[in-house]
Image (cartoon, rainbow, N blue to C red):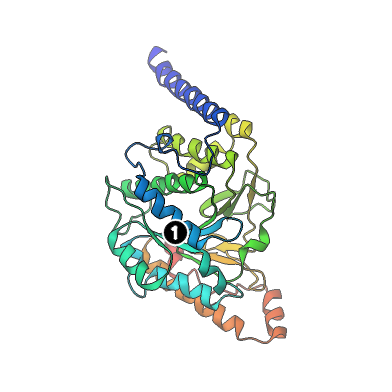
Amino acid sequence: MTASFKPKASLFALMILMFGCLLFYFSASPFEGRLNTSLWKKSHPMTSADQRELVQVLRNASMPDRTVILTTLNDAWASPGSVIDLFLESFWIGEDTKKLLNHLVIVAMDEKAYGRCMSIHPHCYFLTTTDVNFTAEKRFMTPDYLKLMWRRIEFLGQVLELGYSFVFTDADIMWFRDPFQHFNVADQLVIACDFYTGDPNDHKNRANGGFNFVKSNAITVEFYKYWYMARVLYPNSNDQAVFDIIKHDPAVNALGLSTKYLDTAYFGGFCQPSKDMNKVSTMHANCCVGIEKKLQDLRLVLDNWKNFTALSTEDKILKGSSKTSPWSAPDKCKSW
């Protein structure tokens, strides 16, 4: 009995400590439009120079309401003809999405990715990380993959603390329509799903952290700190799995965070594809492991979209009412 009790007691004590830290942060109200780096992981402190550079990049890309679009990029996805090129192409061929490129910041995770970004896009930021090399492809759930995901959560929390709201998007998401029409002023955290239950408020939706809109305020800043701290409790889990756990926590409920889940009819993916191209805003290469599989299927997605936009209005309506899938993908990604 004693041997089985101690781990549970330690886990309970850690949860109490996290809850106490959260309450302290919230009562102290550190959200002042500047970065308090002591609240984030000590191994990734942001220098004054780094912070000034980040603020300048965010300011240059910001919408009037201090909202930016963010994606991350490493060298594996940055080469010509790779994921980043397909991602940017989707903005060019989407409906009323080209203008959104003015508000997109590409966050490079290594020097090669930063160099490529600087050659193809005006808003780039190099996120330095000293304890891991993010250059190569990070296979799903490998140790480096987990480090990459948690580094991303840490960075996004810092962006919120600087007073900027954001839409975060993985680069393997194709943008075909402006997603902002699906957000409203009351939204705090809006997140995409691998699988959608039909209710935007249902916590049984399986969230996907690859696409989300987060409004910068004291509540979301504290939530991201709590989310980042929670990785200690679940060391072999990624950010998405931990999110699905802590969204039920009393500490999160105490914050008053409101979470809305996006309908896959508008924000679909290979897990649960959108069925009507007349509705789709984004298409995600989720439920797929391996860059080559993603590339082949994302090219199919872009081709499907180009063919759809070339149709007459009547044919578009007919295609939307069809019971067959409008997508050729997933094809290679079926075997993920």
- Residue type at numbered disc 1: Val
Q: Is residue 222 visible?
A: yes
* Residue 325, horizontal then vertical, whole percent: 60, 72
* Residue 251, horizontal then vertical, whole percent: 58, 30
Q: Quadrant of residue 218?
A: top right
Q: Quadrant of residue 31?
A: top right
Q: Is residue 141 visible?
A: no
Q: Quadrant of residue 254?
A: top right
| Residue indicated by mark 1 | 57
* Residue 330, horizontal then vertical, whole percent: 49, 68
* Residue 110, horizontal then vertical, whole percent: 30, 58
Residue ID at (57%, 49%): 206
Q: Is residue 255 above or below residue 135?
A: above
Classed neighbour count for the residue bearing mark 1: other residues with Cα under 10 Å, few (<14), some (14–19), many (≥20): some
Residue 206 vs residue 246, the one in the foreground: 246
Local secondary structure at mark 1: helix
Residue 102 vs residue 285, the one in the foreground: 102
- Furthest residue toward top: 2
Left or right of 200 in this view: 93: left
Residue ID at (33%, 69%): 116
Left or right of 325 in this view: 170: left
Left or right of 93 in this view: 52: left
Q: Quarter holding the C terminus? A: bottom left
Q: Is residue 59 above or below residue 216?
A: below
Residue 217 vs residue 210, the one in the foreground: 217
Q: Quarter holding the N terminus? A: top left
Numbered label tally: 1
